[in-house]
Image (cartoon, rainbow, N blue to C red):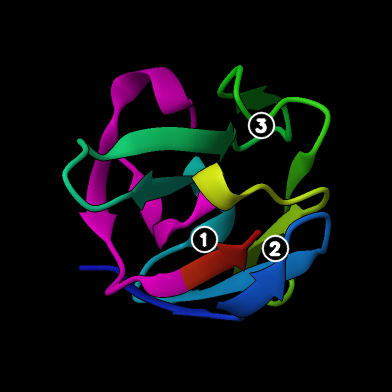
Amino acid sequence: QVQLVESGGGLVQAGGSLRLSCAASGRTFSAYAMGWFRQAPGKERELVAAIARGGSTNYADSVKGRFTISRDNAKNTVYLQMNSLKPEDTAVYSCAAGRSGAWSYGFGSWGQGTQVTVSS
């Protein structure tokens, strides 16, 4: 069973940046895809970004060009760099561990989440 712990959330003004981190433990980190999800109040959880075992990435249209997902397999950590933040990016952000090396096979474990609030 994989354990995921996020950090880096907080309050930021519109146009600002934040970097989220997610430390993973409990299995071979480098073998699996990783993702970042978010859920705003009253809305369904959505996939924001994903990175496959080989490093290929996928982004939601709403964050393309502003967010960057990356991974450091030596540190068992996945990151989400968020730039040009907008109030509509306000949500609880959670990292997720893939069921395989490709994100298309879905995600099976989530962290507890970290709050990101963007003020206008």
Asked if residue 11 lies left or right of residue 17, the reply is left
Q: CA distance from mark 1 to mark 3?
A: 25 Å
Please tell me which residue is depicted at 41% across the width and 34% down the height of the picture. 47
Tell me the magenta residue range.
Answer: 89-115
Residue at numbered disc 3: 63
Q: Is residue 26 magenta?
A: no
Residue at numbered disc 1: 29
Q: Earlier in the sequence, mark 3 or mark 2?
A: 3
Q: Residue furthest front?
A: 120
Tell me where residue 98 appears, x and y as whole percent: 37, 42
Q: Is residue 110 above or below residue 84?
A: below
Of 78 and 67, the residue lying toward us? 67
Tell me where residue 17 appears, x and y as whole percent: 80, 64
Please tell me which residue is depicted at 48% across the width and 56% down the height of the picture. 90
Residue at numbered disc 2: 73
Asked if residue 74 lies left or right of residue 43, the reply is right
Element assignment for label 2? loop
Labels in figure, total: 3
Of 17 and 78, the residue lying toward us? 17
Q: Is residue 19 above or below residue 65?
A: below
Res. 25 visible in picture: yes
Q: Quadrant of residue 64?
A: top right
